[in-house]
Image (cartoon, grey):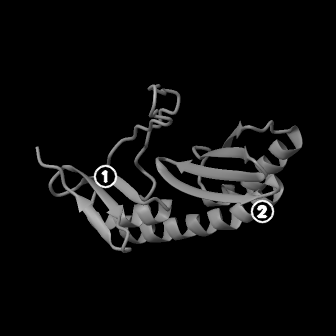
Amino acid sequence: MRVDIYAKNYEVGEKLKNITEQKLAKLDKYFKDDETAARVSFKKQGNSLTTEVMLDYNGKFVRATATSDNFYENIDVILPKLEGQIRKHRTKFDKHNKNAAFSDAAMFDLKNKEENSKVQVVKKKSFVLSPMTVKEAEEEMELLGHSFYVFLEAKSNSVQVLYKRNDGDLGLIEPQI
């Protein structure tokens, strides 16, 4: 597994890097090859230290975050979360796709940033849309822990947005051209 470490308002020492890489290497047992990439972000905001780990395996993502006053504790909290999500992710998709769950690739372009005077786009992502049903999109959104999910609806071949409403239900945006 390739591990990329990023830091914001903090300088990551060699000891933290080594321990992070060693602990994430324990997750290699869930992946068949070295195509897996882990993006680890260490952020310091005031007294709180936040660690975020996002695993990318052939375009499928698993993400976990922890905040405390110690980065080492955060890694220990994140690992069980990731492991549970990986098992849940693989189980659901193995049932539906018969072991073809991790076949589509996604591309992220985190380097392009645009600047405005008041409101700024601080992160830009691009990815390949793969056809899926609304139910599959709901499962992906749940696995990622996001409040919305953009996908290509398989039957109509149109881009749609699934989002979580304030009342806890889901909404679906179907653009008309």
In percent of the image, x 36 and y 74: which residue is there? Answer: 167
Q: CA distance from mark 2 to mark 1?
A: 33 Å
Check the image and report above or below for 141 versus 109: below
Which residue reaches farthest front?
Answer: 118
- Can you see residue 69? yes
Looking at the rendered structure, the kind of residue marked 2 is Asp
Please state if 118 lies on the left or on the right of 171 as rendered: right
Residue bearing mark 2? 76
Which residue reaches farthest left?
Answer: 177
Tally of numbered tags: 2
User: What is the x, y in percent for residue 92?
Assistant: 44, 70
Residue bearing mark 1? 151
User: At numbered mark 1, what does the secondary structure look like: helix, strand or loop?
Assistant: strand
Mark 2 Cα within 10 Å, few/some/many (few <14, many 20+)? few
Check the image and report above or below for 174 versus 114: below
Q: Residue 93's mark? A: none
